[in-house]
Image (cartoon, grey):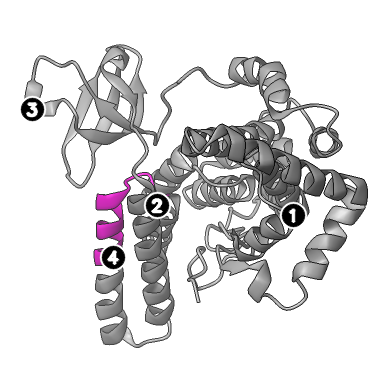
Amino acid sequence: MDLITGIEMDMRGIHAEQPRPTWEEAVARMLATEHKSRDGTSFTLGETPGFGREWIEGVLQDSIGEAWKDDWAAESEEEGEEDKEDGEGGEEDEDAEGEELHRSLRRLLDGLVEYGLQSEGEVDGITDSLARGETTARQVLETWGPRLAAAQPSAALEVGLLVEIHSLSHADLNGKQGYCTAWDAAKERWGVALVSTTRALAVRPANLRAAAPPSPKDAESAAEMAYEAARLLSEARQKGADGAAALTAQAEARLAASEARDPACSVMLQLRGDLAHMRGSHERMAIEMHRAVANCRGSREEKLSCRMGLANALGEAGDAAGEEAQLRAVLRIAPSHIHARFALGSALSQSAPSSEPNPRPRQPTQPRVCTSGLARAPGPSVVPKP
């Protein structure tokens, strides 16, 4: 979802709050809202040159219309009077309900594109209908929610997914978290690598469930530590052997602390993949990137970034079929993704049969597409926060 569409959806979410803020209050909140660029850098519109109040007004003028703005102001005044008469009871519950409805709608719209149920243009049409008041968030959720649920793998376990063990006779294992490694069809069990240990188990699917997400505070803390690790790894590449070793050790400590707070932090998992790549361990890189893909809770762009990283890792590990599958998955979600197109063309050209008597072997060290969507260079795929 692009920035302008996100702003429209955020404003619609504010419009659904009770009591409804004034137009000026809503615009002020948008100016202070934190956004993330594709490289993970945080910014606010109010502090970014060229993206101030006039820009937001212009965006909404073009996409939503002056009449809607005027209606908002009129409704805010009228409903404010009604709220005074009704008292203050239940306002916090209504605010929370409106915010949750808004979050659910944004997840739904991202999912419609990700699972191929709607194109980006069609999703833009839905947001336009919401902006014009032709439909409501609840109606969109009721219409498309069941279809999206049917298109998704129903709570399916997959390689790399963070899971929680439950209902085992060995009570000491219940509540433990780990990453799915591989499905053993003969034993009908998943391999599970426990978090922060070298211990691995074989567990029936009935005794596994997707791990609950961390608290917002822990999730934010984990991401911050991971970005600090990215900065340290970037500095390590510019140092000599002795200095690099010390910085790398500090980065590993930050990543361990990040995992302790949120084992599903996709930034942390991608950086571990990059660290494995630095050490020439392509198989380990693929493991970490599988985990990043399976557990990414971020935006559509972040999910595409994780999948591109996995494609790169599989290619480096010599799994041409896996690399191709991941690149095609990216193009199903974003058909115009230029880096995925380039990488897929490169992979197919290298795997095509050659008429030469002694065709050149595939070069595993050639530059590939990394998780940031750029040619692999001696630097982390996750850009450190400034």
Bin the neighbour count of mark 2 within 10 Å (Cα to Cα): few under 14, some 14-19, many 20 and up. Answer: many
Q: Considering the numbered disc 2 on the image, is that residue within a helix, a strand or a loop?
A: helix
On the picture, is 97 further left or further right than 137? left
CA distance for labels 2 and 1: 41 Å
The residue closer to the viewer here, 43 or 268, is 43
2 and 3 marks in contact (CB < 8 Å): no
**Which label number is shown at residue 172?**
3
| Residue 327 circle label | none
| Residue 331 pos. (x, y %) | 72, 40
Q: How many marks?
A: 4
* Neighbours of disc 4 within 10 Å: few (<14), some (14-19), many (20+): many
Q: Residues within 10 Å of mark 3 (few under 14, many from 20)?
A: few
Residue 260 magenta-drawn?
yes
* Residue behind mark 1: 23
Magenta residues, as a range? 252-265
Q: Secondary structure at mark 3?
A: helix
Residue closest to the eye, 149 or 93:
93
Looking at the rendered structure, the kind of residue marked 2 is Leu
Q: CA distance from mark 4 to mark 1?
A: 43 Å
Provide the residue designation for mark 4.
254
Report how far apart the C-alphas of labels 1 and 3 lie in the structure: 55 Å
